[in-house]
Image: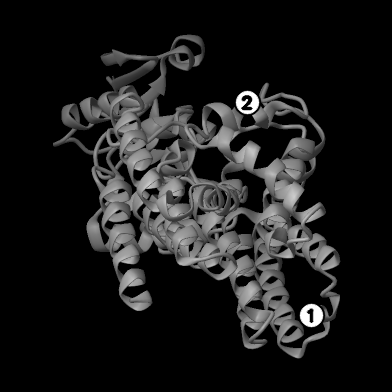
Amino acid sequence: MGRAKEIIYLSIIFIFAIIILFWNIGTGSLTSWDEALYAQVSKEMLISNNWLDLTWAGQPWSDKPPLYMWFTVIFYKLFGINELSVRLFSALCGLGTVVITYFLARRLYSKEAGFVSSLILLSTYQFLLAAKMGMLDCAFTFFITLALFLFKLGEERKGYLFWFWLAFCAAFMVKGAGALIILIILAVYLISSRQLWLFKQKQFLFGMLLAFAILFYWHFQSFMHYGQGFIRGYFIKHLLIRTTTTVEGHTGDLFTYFGVLGNKGRPWGIFGIIAIFFIFYRIIIKRENKHLLPFTWAIGVFIVFSLVKTKLHWYIVPIYPALAVLISYAFVNLFRKKAVIVILVLFIIFSGYLAIAKKIYFLDLSPNPKRVALAVNKITLSQNNLFFYGVGDPGIIFYLDSRYKYLSEEQLKAKLKEKDNYIVFETNILRKSVVGNFDLILEDSGVSLVKIR
């Protein structure tokens, strides 16, 4: 009976997850900035066939490691350059996160808790948004979840401690130094559970050496290619400055992410906050150490990103699998045998709300860049000598035909003197700095297409 029940639970989870996570991800438009930016970096990687030296708009780009872009290029090759290929790796990582969350809650508590935790995660707005968009956060969350689950398995079967480090390495290759949150969570967990001896296991040490070797190789190759630009973009801009100062007005305080959990984490975010206090009581008063890993995980993510000066709501996405596990225990503890029925009813209600009120299945958050770029492509369909200059919106750049080439300032001066060149500008740049004989072919949403006479 137990085996049959688990098959039923997993079948329901897979059916719901595939429908929710993959339905309509190939429609709408890519969101400017980040989603379209990563898509364009991947597009340029495909065109250049250079998988190590990343570029954006023709310029060296070293802000993030390349793992997400590698998968996107693979999907470009399989399915073409489109929204589906950009978002598919996120959706697959979302599916993987839901499944691992089931097995983690099952291992800590019960099959019922595993089932409940998966449905909670599948009906959490911000997690779904991350899983259905071509950004880094769901892949990052997946590898964090995988790493911590593998470590939990490694407490009994030491071979998993080696694989923990490969999952950590993958998380690092998705989002860089943010993956250090895994080691912070792990250190606090091992101290609080009095298992520091696991650090000395040979499988753990071998895995650590391999992971550090891989990461060192990539960082060394990037430095050799980008030089000081790698130090400025990767370390200073995206690690030091974002951690210690507010970037681009994304400010907040130590309570900012309470609001994010209540708003973006709806409808389960409030339940998650309550569950944290409930689990804290169970740990301190009841001495229930089985909660330590998800509790440390949730608290660690919340505190670390609350201390980071630059506040972006998607930084908190890795907290949701941990919250789902904690909430599942509280629900099963409260409703007992009725927990599965209660969560199924709530899941259906909340999923309907997200579909209707939040339009989670119709992601068309930046339609103008796509519309304008496709209009430009249509006008110049049979033309040659296609260029763009000073276009800052990555959505415009991504949707422009691959025949459009980036111009530097020096190249622009030469192309303005050549007859029948088509050049896309940002309108304000065209008006302020371009002098010459040209015909204005199109002007729309701050973008202009001109033909040189």
Residue at 29% from the left image edge and 29% from the top image edge: 370
Asked whether the viewer can see residue 44, the reply is no
**Amino acid residing under circle 1:** Leu
Please tell me which residue lies in front, 246 or 189.
189
Residue at 43% from the left image edge and 50% from the top image edge: 339
Please tell me which residue lies in front, 58 or 339.
339
Q: The residue tagged with tag 2: helix, strand or loop?
A: helix
Residue 259's disc is: 2
CA separation in Å, label 1 and label 2: 37 Å
The quarter in which the N terminus is drawn is: bottom left
**Amino acid residing under circle 2:** Gly
Q: Give the image location of residue 6, x and y in percent.
A: 36, 70
Quadrant of residue 201 within the rendered picture: bottom right
Q: The residue tagged with tag 1: helix, strand or loop?
A: helix
Residue at 76% from the left image edge and 38% from the top image edge: 308
Quadrant of residue 450 within the rendered picture: top left
Quadrant of residue 99 within the rendered picture: bottom left
Compared to residue 368, the image places residue 443 above or below, namely above
Residue at 60% from the left image edge and 60% from the top image edge: 144
Q: Identify the residue under disc 1.
A: 198
Question: Left or right of 189: which side holds 311?
Answer: left
Compared to residue 42, the image places residue 204 above or below, namely below
| Residue farthest left in this picture | 382
Residue count near mark 2 (Cα–Cα under 10 Å), binned few <14, some 14–19, many ≥20 = few
The mark tally for this picture is 2
Q: Give the image location of residue 169, x and y in percent.
A: 63, 68
Q: Give the image location of residue 281, x and y in percent.
A: 76, 47
Compared to residue 331, the image places residue 71 above or below, namely below
